[in-house]
Amino acid sequence: MAALRSVHVTGWGAYTPSLVLTNADLERMVDTSDEWIVTRTGIRERRIASPTDTTASMAAVAGLRAIATAGLDVHDIDLIIVGTLTPDYPLPSAAVLVKEAIGNAHAAAMDLAAACSGFAYGYGMAHAYLASGLARHALVIGSETMSRCTDWTDRGTCVLFGDGAGAVVLSASDEPGGAMGIELNTETAATYSIWIPAGGAARPANEASVAAREHYMRMKGQETFKLAVRKLASTSLMAVEKAGITLEDIDLAVPHQANVRILEALAKSVHFPPERLFVNIDRYGNTSAASVPIALTEAVAAGRIKPGDRILLAAFGAGGTSGAIVLKWTADPANRLRAEGIGPERVTLLDSGLEPINPFPPALEWMLAEPGHSAAAQTPATAR
Ligand code: UT7
């Protein structure tokens, strides 16, 4: 067996839809307030996928941006992993649609189901694949259309989530740097803390399940909060230990953005300086598997990451999944400029042949009629 190769982040990119749902908008839909949402979660607004955005289409745009940033051709990608809990269809995988949409010739493509930890798990799997010499370049994506599985009458969950996609290209290399320590684990005690009861093989969707709203996500908030803090801390510490360094050596932590209070509690529990935690939850809410790569892309654009920095990526999600990666950044942050000009118009998903339906949540239909909900006038994080 050949020696393990190092695996670097060579490309990165994100795509967030332009429709913006604010806390003031939610005040008109459920019994909540901007004050409650901001103080309990840190969220001010979140993005909502348009009727034509899907998990696969957003993933493809983020993926194309990451490939361009890496300076690669789409055919250079040998493996495509999409971490998602909201694939376009139960079958085929979103990754297959992404592969077709970006026009890649020979990559193996698959989805990875680890909820909000899906990107971190995908990173770990791709790392192992590349380090062992099985391939040279992998595209790892986190993409979610959470708005399609959100119960817009449940104030306990509907204020939290948002849509979007983020991606990295990982490349095998003989140069030093890249991932130094990876830890993935799963705590089964949280199996039903966040779940979607119906639509799988155990409870196929039927009229009764739809009437009972079992096709929407359910969450035990407080239970999840405590476990998230504990697991983000222990998993991060394990990854840092595997890297042979300590938390003090981390220049920037880019954690899953679920609740700013979770991040504050995390920093406190492991004595990590909060100013070295990257936070963008105020603008996107919890985008599940997409949150870490969107945050990473924004952190690079904001000048928070430079070559030589030691970065910690950390995620926690449904099913008690958690993952952390410690890596030494080696790419030139200016490479992000190579992705300029790549937008959703570059992506067309393969036609299924079925009559199209509008997947937009009926509870949000008013957003499409009211002007002023688009972030197009703002600087899109996606173009960075
Ligand atoms: O991606 C990983 C998975 N997700 C998470 O990590 C989320 C983890 N959990 C959380 O972030 C927090 O538990 C929540 C933000 C979901 C809830 O915050 P909390 O401080 O744990 O609130 P709570 O559930 O203890 O509820 C406190 C009160 C309740 O009212 P009563 O019973 O005290 O009268 C809730 O009914 O707040 C009420 N409440 C709300 N009030 C206004 C719950 N949601 C809302 C709301 N607006 N949106």
Image (cartoon, rainbow, N blue to C red):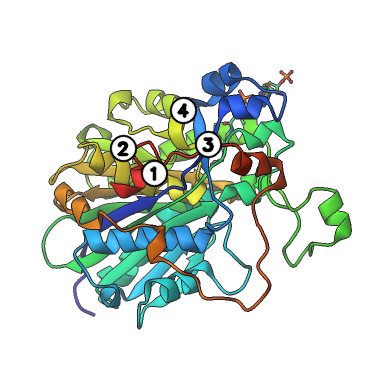
Give the amino acid at mark 3: His
Q: Are marks 3 and 1 in contact (CB under 8 Å)?
A: no
C-alpha separation, residue under disc 3 versus residue under disc 4 = 24 Å
Mark 3 sits near ligand 1, with its Cβ under 8 Å away: no
Question: Who is closer to the viewer here, 101 or 200?
Answer: 101
Closer to the chain start, of discs 3 and 1, is 1
- Circle 4 SS class: helix
Assign the N terminus to one quadrant of the image.
Answer: bottom left
Mark pair 4, 1: CA separation: 14 Å
State which tag comes first along the sequence, 2 or 3: 2
Question: Residue flagged by tag 1: what amino acid is it?
Answer: Ala
Mark 2 → mark 4, Cα distance in angstroms: 14 Å
Label drawn at residue 314? 1
Q: Are marks 1 and 2 in contact (CB under 8 Å)?
A: yes
For residue 130, side relative to residue 317 (left or right): left
179 lies left or right of 285:
left
